[in-house]
């Protein structure tokens, strides 16, 4: 039996919506529902998910549900909540999340692909392919439901140039296509438009300008497909289109605080159905969400295979120029054959990033670490704190070494603090994964405006004890060693290695929260991605610049982004996901060590900082610019 608490939507002339809770006598069918702890949990869940996008009205219904899959086992109930609507679903622990979504389908008139279920207790999105038991969804658990609703024109119309866009297939054997996961990078922009802002005209402007910019960046309107043994892909530029969604949100911008990339923020970005055939998955999805306070968010999901952060910034800049009716800037360079492997292939280096990540000492696998709860945090660093970290890094550097950059100092410090928070043994091997922009490292450099994935993943390796006990400059020095390995010959060696691999399946998935697939890059390892110098900010589509731009999610334990701060010039933010058992200690160590550390008052200047207007031709000396 499925018992539903419904809501009635009543619209007035002001478009105000009043939600009235529909009570039913069915409550009496369940014991313990009137207990104070239960009511408290329900209130907390309602408050947490009150702001979820309202996409379709729900009607109160009671319908029969399928029999449990194991008649001999006692049935369980879960509470599926959306705003002030609660569905009590009778289910079996062996049922998958997809089974639960199919039960919800007749209730909410939304297919399973348009539903997202999140376990309230952990904040983790539930995997369709896993059972309730697999994901620790227990009896009387509270699960949050988020819905998606596409606009009437779900696929954005593309302005076509028949001679160019009828059908173009790019079969490319290069690293920017062949060793990346089939996933999308989520990014969010938050806006607070002026009082004379017109939402209707804004939505129309977004549609028209997106269709126009896709003429120039037409690979994003195409689709990927499997080739060969099913582990390599090719890009088919068939102008099928990007996907555009619209949503409304009964919430204030202030309720998101510092826009930490939690599941709440992630709901403002379109989700992707990776169970669909590859050739049906859009490479670009966009969602514009209107808030109760008049604010707007622009959420984007962009294929990791298609672009890196530099190319994405180029695309966004051009889109904003078109939306404002201004002349175009540098057009994209779309010939990705400039990164073809050599013939015959010649591998000259040991590329560590292709090796399995190290395990915790004493363990034979990482199953236990994969299943531990994680949380996210935004660590804010003032300009003074950043300068102090640079001073700490440069205090005992080698006499002939150039000054360490902000990224090298902050990343080395975070690596050190994470080892302490995780209580690593001295002999524990730990790896730090970095991304290096190769545009200016090639000979000759890649053409101006190169549009693709021109980064290389590299690895810095150390014993945890050395990171924690050696001078502070040790961590930044290991990071610099890894970055400076990336030369023209090193990149070509990596291209040759990828071309020679018989099967690339293991690179197509990686572990994310709630997933057991792919390599696990969490404890004892971490990945620090630099967005410093990346011109992601200042995207004005005609209603002013954003008040926030940042990641929509942080995928796994140990993953982090280093970004410029929103207010003070020279300040930084570190968006980080870590295991719940480690986060509080890390936060305490992170700030305490800065405050306690003695260092000179010398001020060191950044070197080779990328200027926003030169993103298409410069390399960020603060580290790689990528997702």
Image (cartoon, rainbow, N blue to C red):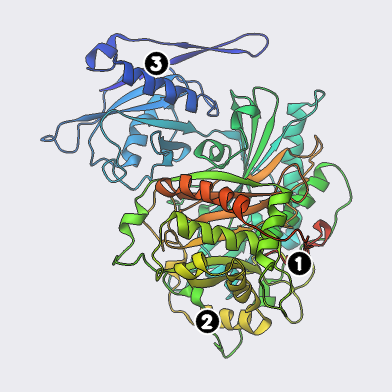
Residue 95 relative to residue 18: left or right: left
* Total numbered labels placed on residues in the image: 3
Could you say where residue 554 lies in the image, as x and y percent from the top left? 53, 49
Q: Between disc 3 and disc 1, whose residue precedes? A: 3
Mark 3 and mark 1 residues within 8 Å of each other at the beta carbon: no
How far apart are labels 2 and 3 at the CA level? Answer: 58 Å
Could you say where residue 109 lies in the image, as x and y percent from the top left? 44, 28
Could you say where residue 177 lies in the image, as x and y percent from the top left? 57, 68
Quarter in which the N terminus is drawn:
top left
Residue 356 relative to residue 323: left or right: left
Q: Nearer the viewer, residue 22 or 397?
A: 397
Residue 60 numbered tag: 3
> Dot 2 corresponds to which residue?
497
> Dot 1 corresponds to which residue?
333
Q: Dot 3 surroundings within 10 Å: few (below 14), some, or many (20 or more)?
A: some
Say what secondary structure mark 3 lies in. Answer: loop
The residue depicted at 67 percent of the width and 9 percent of the height is 13
Residue ranking furthest to the left: 72
Q: Between disc 2 and disc 3, whose residue precedes? A: 3
Q: Nearer the viewer, residue 399 or 13?
A: 399
Q: Is residue 54 above or below residue 457?
A: above
Q: Dot 1 surroundings within 10 Å: few (below 14), some, or many (20 or more)?
A: some
How far apart are labels 3 and 1 at the CA level? Answer: 54 Å
The residue depicted at 52 percent of the width and 55 percent of the height is 559
Q: Is residue 264 above or below residue 507?
A: above
Could you say where residue 406 lies in the image, as x and y percent from the top left? 70, 60
Q: Nearer the viewer, mark 2 or mark 1?
A: 2
Q: Nearer the viewer, mark 2 or mark 3?
A: 2
Q: Between disc 2 and disc 1, whose residue precedes? A: 1
Residue 302 numbered tag: none
The residue depicted at 58 percent of the width and 71 percent of the height is 474
Residue 193 relative to residue 364: left or right: right
């Amino acid at each position: 039996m499925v018992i539903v608490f419904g809501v009635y939507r009543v619209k007035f002339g002001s478009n105000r919506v009043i939600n009235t809770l529909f009570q039913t006598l069915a409550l009496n069918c369940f014991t313990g529902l009137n207990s104070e702890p239960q009511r408290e949990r329900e209130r907390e869940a309602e408050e947490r998910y009150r702001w979820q996008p309202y996409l379709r009205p729900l009607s109160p219904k009671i319908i029969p549900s399928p029999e449990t899959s194991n008649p001999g086992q006692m049935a369980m109930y879960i509470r599926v909540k959306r705003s002030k609507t609660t569905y009590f679903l009778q289910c079996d622990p062996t049922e998958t999340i997809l089974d639960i979504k199919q039960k919800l389908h007749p209730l909410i008139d939304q297919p399973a692909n348009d539903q997202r279920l999140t376990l309230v207790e952990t904040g983790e999105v539930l995997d369709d392919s896993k059972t309730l038991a697999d994901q620790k969804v227990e009896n009387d658990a509270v699960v949050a439901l988020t819905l998606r609703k596409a606009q009437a024109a779900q696929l954005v119309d593309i302005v076509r140039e028949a001679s160019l866009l009828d059908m173009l297939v790019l079969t490319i054997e290069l690293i920017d296509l062949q060793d990346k996961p089939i996933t999308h990078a989520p990014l969010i922009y938050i806006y607070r438009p002026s009082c004379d802002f017109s939402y209707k005209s804004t939505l129309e402007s977004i549609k028209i300008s997106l269709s126009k910019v896709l003429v120039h960046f037409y690979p994003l309107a195409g689709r990927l497909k499997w080739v060969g043994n099913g582990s390599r892909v090719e890009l088919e530029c068939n102008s099928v289109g990007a996907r555009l969604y619209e949503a409304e949100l009964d919430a204030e911008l202030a309720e998101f605080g510092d826009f930490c990339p939690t599941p709440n923020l992630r709901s403002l970005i379109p989700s992707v159905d990776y169970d669909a055939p590859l050739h049906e998955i859009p490479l670009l999805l966009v969602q514009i969400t209107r808030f109760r306070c008049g604010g707007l968010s622009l959420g984007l999901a962009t294929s990791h295979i298609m672009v890196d952060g530099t190319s994405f910034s180029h695309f966004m800049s051009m889109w904003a120029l078109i939306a404002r009716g201004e002349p175009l800037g540098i057009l994209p360079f779309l010939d990705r054959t400039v990164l073809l492997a050599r013939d015959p292939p010649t591998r000259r280096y040991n590329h560590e990033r292709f090796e399995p990540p190290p395990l915790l000492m004493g363990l034979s696998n990482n199953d236990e670490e994969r299943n531990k709860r994680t949380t996210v945090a935004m660590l804010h660093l003032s300009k003074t704190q950043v300068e102090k970290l640079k001073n700490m890094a440069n205090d005992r550097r080698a006499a002939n070494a150039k000054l360490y950059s902000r990224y090298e100092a902050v990343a080395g410090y975070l690596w050190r603090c994470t080892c302490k928070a995780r209580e690593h043994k001295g002999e524990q091997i730990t790896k730090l994964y970095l991304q290096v922009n190769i545009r200016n490292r090639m000979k000759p450099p890649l053409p101006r405006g190169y549009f693709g994935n021109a980064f290389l993943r590299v690895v810095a390796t150390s014993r945890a004890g050395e990171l924690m006990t050696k001078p502070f400059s040790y961590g930044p020095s290991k990071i610099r060693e890894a970055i400076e390995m990336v030369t023209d010959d090193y990149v070509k060696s990596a291209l040759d290695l990828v071309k020679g691999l018989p099967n690339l399946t293991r690179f197509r998935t990686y572990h994310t929260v709630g997933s057991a697939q792919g390599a696990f890059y969490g404890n004892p390892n971490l990945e620090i991605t630099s967005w410093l110098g990346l011109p992601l900010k200042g995207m004005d589509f005609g209603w002013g610049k954003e008040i926030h731009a940042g990641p929509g999610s942080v995928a796994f334990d140990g993953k982090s982004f280093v970004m410029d701060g929103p207010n003070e010039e020279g300040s930084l933010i570190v968006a980080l996901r870590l295991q719940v058992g480690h986060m509080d200690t890390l936060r305490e160590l992170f700030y305490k060590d800065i405050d306690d550390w003695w260092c000179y008052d010398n001020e060191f200047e950044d070197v080779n900082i990328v200027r926003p207007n030169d993103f298409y031709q410069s390399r960020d000396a603060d580290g790689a610019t990528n997702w």
